[in-house]
């Protein structure tokens, strides 16, 4: 009898799962994805490819030092604000932080000549000044994700006088010799980056995504198989749609910015070697002295730990910490694992340094 009862229970469960699969499959194919990026916010400044937002406080007491979040220029910032209960921004607001975010728009044809100089000597300083004025403060903490972490580091190295209070980097590439995909996609023996940037002007996001797919030909199929296995699970399907939707919602790159990344970072590894010149000024990571937290994803295939780890070793900050957490490039920031691991650790580190 126990066997028959167990078998009957399993059959009932499979039947329920099969029904949910059919319902969720139909919903997946016929409905728009879940709403994302819904935390209340105010547009503080808009300028071409850049939008600066201020998020509405949800607590009466707010930390003195505001926090500016910056996404990589290839991606939308709503990864920080996926959905209620799954939003890093919502979490930070509930913990008493004054949150600002730079969200990027596709660069126009008139912006194809944007370079690293524009981001670190113009866009970031301008946004930080606006935050200082809006919040009535002298210091601001800066958090950069992936390539935005590179921009944040370059900015911090070139502005040791402030106004940075703290620097936080998420999975930021420093030693580009350790990025296998970059070496493969930007092999100087095959890639004429000058011809590509000059001919296209704007590097299409689809071209970059297709190149990644070529490096991981089974990745998309594996994702579909995992989706099918979990199609009965409403929360899994919702999370899958939000994550894959964000990945597909990529942005193109200004041609000159792309050219600079390939030549200076990928080919010369100039940021690590200390040979990078921005606006005629030498960028030395050793010039960074502010408190630094670098969070690295243990199973990151885009920015492997070996690529990210030299940052903490290089900076001169006496208050610096490297945190390696389980997870991948995206699950580091968003998803159930991030809620349990990264978010509390970030709050614990930043709260002590935001008063």
Image (tube, rainbow, N blue to C red):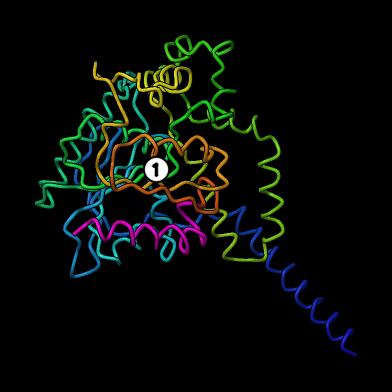
Magenta stretch: residue 333 in it? Answer: yes
Image quarter hosting the N terminus: bottom right
Horizontal relation, residue 232 to residue 100: left or right: right
Q: Nearer the viewer, residue 257 or 107?
A: 257
Residue 278's spot in the image, x, y percent?
A: 28, 20
Horizontal relation, residue 198 to residue 152: left or right: right
Query: Is 296 situated above or below 263?
Result: below
Q: Which residue has dot 1 on it? A: 145
Horizontal relation, residue 47 to residue 107: left or right: left
Picture residue at 50% right of the left edge, 58% below the top = 335
Query: Is 111 situated above or below 334?
Result: above
Picture residue at 26% right of the left edge, 25% below the top = 118
- Other residues around mark 1 within 10 Å, as few (<14) / some (14–19) / many (≥20): many
Image quarter hosting the C terminus: bottom left
Query: Is 1 situated above or below 320?
Result: below
Picture residue at 43% right of the left edge, 32% below the top = 174
Query: Is 219 situated above or below 114?
Result: below
Magenta stretch: residue 95 in it? Answer: no
Element at label 1: strand
Horizontal relation, residue 163 to residue 94: left or right: left
Q: Is residue 138 visible?
A: yes
Residue 311's spot in the image, x, y percent?
A: 39, 37
Q: In this picture, which residue range is highlighted in magenta?
A: 332-355
Q: Nearer the viewer, residue 175 or 100?
A: 175
Residue 42's spot in the image, x, y percent?
A: 22, 52
Name the main secondary structure of what is drawn in magenta.
helix
Looking at the image, the residue that sits furthest to the bottom is 1
Q: Nearer the viewer, residue 286 or 47?
A: 286
User: How many labels were placed on the picture?
Assistant: 1
Q: Is residue 202 visible?
A: no
């Amino acid at each position: 009898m126990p066997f028959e009862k167990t078998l009957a229970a399993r059959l009932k469960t499979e039947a329920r799962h099969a029904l949910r699969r059919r319902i969720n499959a139909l919903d997946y194919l016929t409905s728009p994805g879940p709403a994302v990026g819904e935390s209340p916010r105010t547009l503080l400044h808009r300028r071409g490819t850049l939008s600066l937002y201020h998020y509405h406080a949800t607590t009466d007491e707010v930390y003195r030092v505001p926090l500016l979040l910056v996404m990589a220029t290839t991606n939308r910032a709503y990864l920080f604000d996926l959905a209620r209960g799954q939003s890093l921004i919502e979490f930070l607001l509930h913990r008493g932080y004054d949150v600002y975010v730079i969200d990027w728009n596709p660069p126009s044809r008139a912006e194809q000549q944007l370079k690293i100089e524009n981001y670190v000597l113009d866009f970031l300083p301008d946004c930080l000044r606006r935050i200082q004025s809006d919040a009535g403060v002298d210091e601001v903490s800066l958090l950069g994700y992936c390539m935005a972490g590179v921009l944040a580091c370059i900015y911090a190295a070139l502005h040791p006088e402030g106004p940075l209070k703290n620097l936080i980097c998420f999975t930021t590439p420093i030693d580009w010799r350790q990025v296998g995909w970059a070496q493969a996609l930007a092999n100087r023996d095959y890639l004429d980056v000058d011809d590509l940037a000059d001919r296209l002007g704007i590097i299409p996001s689809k071209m970059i995504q297709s190149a990644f797919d070529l490096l991981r030909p089974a990745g998309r199929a594996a994702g579909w198989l995992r989706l099918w296995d979990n199609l009965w699970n409403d929360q899994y399907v919702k999370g899958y749609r939000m994550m894959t939707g964000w990945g597909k919602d990529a942005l193109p790159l200004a041609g000159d910015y792309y050219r600079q990344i390939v030549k200076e970072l990928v080919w010369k590894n100039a940021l690590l070697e200390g040979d990078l010149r921005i606006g005629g000024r030498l960028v030395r990571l050793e010039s960074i002295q502010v408190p630094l937290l670098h969070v690295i994803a243990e199973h990151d295939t885009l920015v492997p730990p070996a690529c990210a780890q030299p940052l903490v070793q290089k900076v001169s900050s006496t208050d610096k910490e490297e945190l390696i957490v389980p997870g991948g490039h995206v699950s580091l920031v968003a998803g159930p694992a991030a809620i349990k691991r990264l978010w509390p650790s970030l709050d614990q580190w930043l709260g002590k340094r935001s008063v």
